[in-house]
Amino acid sequence: MTETDMPTALNLPMVDPLPPETQKYFDICTEKLGMIPNVLKAYAFDIEKLNAFTAMYNDLMLADSNLSKLEREMIAVVVSSINRCFYCLVAHGAAVRQLSGDPKLGEMLVMNYRVAPLDDRQRAMLDFAAKMTTASAEIEEPDRQRLRDVGFSDRDIWDIANVAGFFNMTNRVASATAMKPNDEYHAQSR
């Protein structure tokens, strides 16, 4: 693998050959997305770590929840914007554009979610995710109550907190390892 093909600045080559179930997962990514996201390639030096990452990601972002897939992606973008995580802003900004059908929304969330035309529910959700990112130790019952007041259940608050927490972690890993977003993301849903 050449330096330009490496998904991060670290020299951690993918397991070769990949186990059949991992290869199948990567083939599904290629079929559905037209690429294998570099975050998956980055974790593929250790299949157990890759499996742990994908299990958590798939549970938080794709499993049943009262939060829509778009709302979960919106949280990912707002957290990543605050953390200035280039990888996640590019990848999840593309997902917001695709899921919303609105390229402007994706750009607004990347730059400053407060300028986006959000309903009260979305605003409260993103305000909570932002506070979790900048001052999690300052979250108090009134912060959770604001979410309840706009219709979120306690289970929904759990989901918001877990999505925001996951992206705070992954942002730091991506930034620390200089993870490179796939070029394909830049042009998606524009």
Image (cartoon, rainbow, N blue to C red):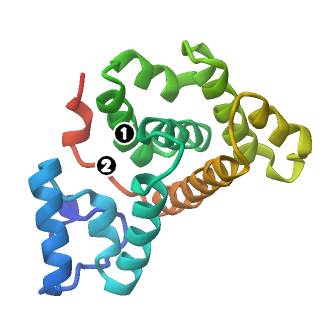
Q: Three-letter amino acid code at disc 2?
A: Pro
Quadrant location of residue 19? bottom left
Few, some or many residues within 10 Å of mark 1 (<14, 14–19, 20+): many
| Disc 1/disc 2 C-alpha distance (Å) | 7 Å
Q: Percent x, y for residue 38?
A: 28, 59
Question: Left or right: 74 with respect to 43?
Answer: right
Residue located at (49% from left, 29% from top): 110
Residue at the spot of label 2: 181
Task: Please tell me whether mark 1 sits on a helix, a strand or a loop.
Answer: helix
Q: Percent x, y for residue 116?
A: 55, 16
Q: Quadrant of the N terminus?
A: bottom left
Q: Percent x, y for residue 70?
A: 43, 36
Q: Is residue 133 visible?
A: yes
Residue located at (42% from left, 42% from top): 69
Q: Is residue 122 above or below residue 4?
A: above
Few, some or many residues within 10 Å of mark 2 (<14, 14–19, 20+): many
Viewer-proximal residue among 66 and 15: 66
Question: Left or right: 182 with respect to 130?
Answer: left
Quadrant location of residue 105? top left
Task: Please tell me whether mark 2 sits on a helix, a strand or a loop.
Answer: loop
Q: Is residue 167 above or below residue 90?
A: below
Residue located at (66% from left, 34% from top): 125
- Count the labels in the image: 2
Q: Percent x, y for residue 155?
A: 67, 53
Viewer-proximal residue among 23 and 70: 70
Question: Left or right: 101 with respect to 24?
Answer: right
Residue at the spot of label 1: 90
Q: Are marks 1 and 2 in contact (CB under 8 Å)?
A: yes
